[in-house]
Image (tube, rainbow, N blue to C red):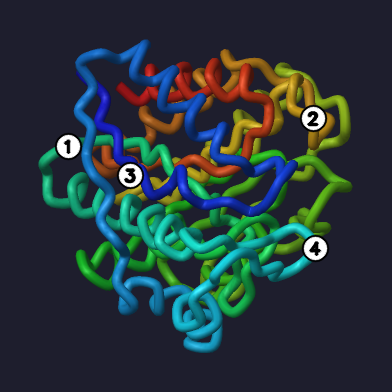
Amino acid sequence: MSPVLFTHPACLEHDPGPGHPECPARLGAVLEALRAAFPKARWCEAPLADRGQLALAHSERLLHALLDHPVEQHRQLDPDTAMGPHSAQAARRAAGAVCAAVDAVVQGGIERAFCAVRPPGHHATHDQAMGFCLFNSVAIGALWARHRHGLSRVAVVDFDVHHGNGTQDILWNVPGTLYLSSHQAPLYPGTGAADETGGRGRCHNVPLPIGCDSRSFREAWRAQLLPELDAFRPELILVSAGFDAHRLDPLAGLDLEATDYQWLTRELVDIAQRHGGGRLVSALEGGYSLTALRQCCVSHVEALA
C-alpha cells in the first residue's frame, strides 16, 4: 500500500528565529527523505484549520493572541516558543492536516496517514502556547473525531521524548479518550509522572530514565502501554510522532534506533486493525537530529504503509 502523506509549503515558513532547534530544515529533511523513499506516495495538501476546529481544544484567549495580532517580524511567547510573520498560518495548516486526515480515514477513503507538518503541537495546552508548540494539532484531531464523526473511543499515543503535557491537559476530562505516553524523566516540561492518570479521560504515563535503550523501551510498551491500548478498543488511533528519543538527538538522552519506531508503529497498526478498521493518523512532533529524522520518518511511514 502506498503511503498517504499530508503537508503544506506553509509549514516550512514558520520561523522561530536564528539558531532555534525547531527550524524549517527539520521538515525539509523529512520531506526529502519521504519523497526519495516513497516515489508513489499520495501527497495531500493540508487545509487551513478553521477557528471552530481550533476552539475544540483551545481557549478564545489563546486564539485571539495567536490569530488576531499579526506578527511583523518576531514575537517571543516564552523562552522557548516564538512566532514569525507566517507562523500562525503554518500552525493552522498543521492542525488542518490532522483534521483532514481524520476525515479521510473515518470516511473510508484511506486507512492510515502521516502528517509531515510543523510546528509541533503536543506541549500546547488549552490556553497556552509553549515548548515550540502553538496549536495542539493531535488533540484537535482527537476532539474533531468525536465532534464531527461521533467516535466514542479515540486514543492518542505519544512516543516523543518529551511528555505531551498539552495533550494530557486538553484530554484530561474528555470521556472516551485515552492518552498514552512514554518519555524521558526528568526532562522538559516536568510533567508525566506515573500517577497522572486522568479525570474523565484516561492517561497512562511511563517515565523512562536517561540512557533507556531499545530493549527497555520495547518492554515498557509491551508490558504496560500496548495492553492498555488494546483493552481500550480504539476506533481511531492518533500518534504524536516525535523522534527525539533517538540516540543522535541533541536535546535528550535516550538511546533508541529507527528500528524501534518501526517496531512500535507495526504494533499500533495491528491494534488499529483489530478494533478500528485500521484507522490511524500520525503527525510529526519533535526530533532535532536531521539524520535521525530522515531515518525514523522513513521507518515509521514504511510501517504505516
Mark pair 3, 2: CA separation: 27 Å
Q: Amino acid at mark 3?
A: His
Give the labeled residue for mark 3: 8
Task: Answer with left or right where residue 150 lies relative to residue 189.
Answer: left
Out of 203 and 65, give the one closest to the viewer.
Answer: 65
Say what secondary structure mark 2 lies in.
loop
Q: Position of residue 236 (x, y in %)?
A: 32, 49
Give the labeled residue for mark 1: 110
Residue at x 60% of width, y 70% of height: 125
Sequence-earlier tag: 3 or 2? 3
Sequence-earlier tag: 4 or 3? 3
Say what secondary structure mark 4 lies in.
loop
Give the labeled residue for mark 4: 79
Give the labeled residue for mark 2: 250
> In the rendered image, which quarter contains the N terminus?
top left
Out of 215 and 284, give the one closest to the viewer.
Answer: 284
> In the rendered image, which quarter contains the C terminus?
top left
Residues at circles 4 and 1 in contact by the CB criterion of under 8 Å: no
Q: Is residue 162 above or below residue 208?
A: below
Task: Answer with left or right where residue 67 lies relative to residue 261.
Answer: left
Task: Answer with left or right where residue 98 lies relative to residue 191.
Answer: left
State which mark lies toward you, 1 or 2: 2
User: Would you say residue 220 is visible in this rendering?
Assistant: no
Sequence-earlier tag: 1 or 2? 1
